[in-house]
Every structure is written in structure tokens, then in C-alpha cells.
Amino acid sequence: MSTEIARLLERMTETWNAGDAAGYAGLFTEDADYITFFGLHLKGRQAIEDAHRELFRTPIKLTEGGPEPRIRPLSADVALVVTGGGSSVDGVPDPSRDSVITLTAVRGPEGWRFASFQNTRVSRP
């Protein structure tokens, strides 16, 4: 389970950095709930693809590193994932974009996909 979900997380970075909106959205279930860092709630794979097609036209790329993702099985087919996120703009790391991301991974007919995504910026209270 953990290996397959870790690979799904790697694919998120790969498809994002390739600007592949359809590939990125394909990592989510058809009815996924995706909440961006500024609170926009995207409902479903098509909405995720549409929003990211526009976003991928910007110079924002995801950066590697950060804490190891925490993958906690909740059942044989569901896991909670907590990971970190960071990005760069024009190749320059931007710490103001660091975030904590929580996802729900589910195993279905297509294999493992994310059913939910919540992105929260890291900031001081």
C-alpha cells in the first residue's frame, strides 16, 4: 500500500512540473474534493483538470524534499496521507509557498487515487 501511494505522490510532482493537467487530474477520483491553499473547493476530476490547465501556464514548479510523507492506513483500501509541499517560481525556491497537504487515498477499479486534497500554507500564528 505505502509504496503505491508514495508513487502516486511522485506522479503528482511529475505531472505538475510537466504541466500535464489531464495527467495530474487523473491521479484523483472522478468525484474528488480538492481544496486549494486559498480555499477554492474544486469538485471532481474535470474541475481539477480545468483549474490546473490555467495554473500550469505559470512558472510555478513543485520542489522535492521536505519531510517524508506520513501514510496511515485506515483500511485495506483507504489511507490518510500527510505530506509537505513547496514550490519555486522561475527556478527560485519560494518559502512563502510552503504548505502542509492532507489527502485521502482510496483503492478502486483504477488502482490507487486521491479522493480528497487539502492544501494549507505554513505560516506563523
Image (cartoon, grey):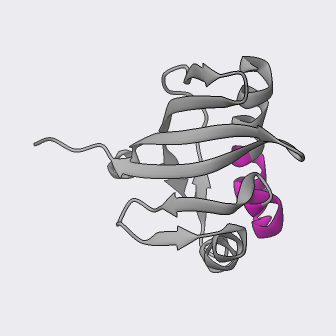
Residue 16 part of the magenta segment: yes
In the rendered image, which quarter contains the N terminus? top right
Q: Foreground: 51 or 58?
A: 51
Residue 91 shows in the view: no
Task: Please give left or right for residue 88 compared with residue 76 in the image.
Answer: left
Q: Residue furthest left?
A: 125
Q: Main secondary structure of the magenta part?
A: helix
* Residue range corresponding to the magenta coloring: 12-25
Residue in the image at 50% along x and 32% along y: 83
Residue in the image at 78% along x and 43% along y: 11
Up the image or down, 109 lies above or below 43; here it is above
Residue 3 part of the magenta segment: no
Residue 99: name its quadrant: top left
Residue in the image at 54% along x and 30% along y: 80
Up the image or down, 14 lies above or below 61; here it is above
How many numbered discs sit on the rendered protein?
Answer: 0
Residue 32 shows in the view: yes
Locate residue 27, reporting x and y percent.
76, 51
Residue in the image at 37% along x and 45% along y: 95
In the rendered image, which quarter contains the C terminus? top left
Q: Foreground: 99 or 89?
A: 99
Locate residue 37, reporting x and y percent.
39, 59
Q: Foreground: 115 or 8?
A: 115
Locate residue 113, reporting x and y percent.
74, 45
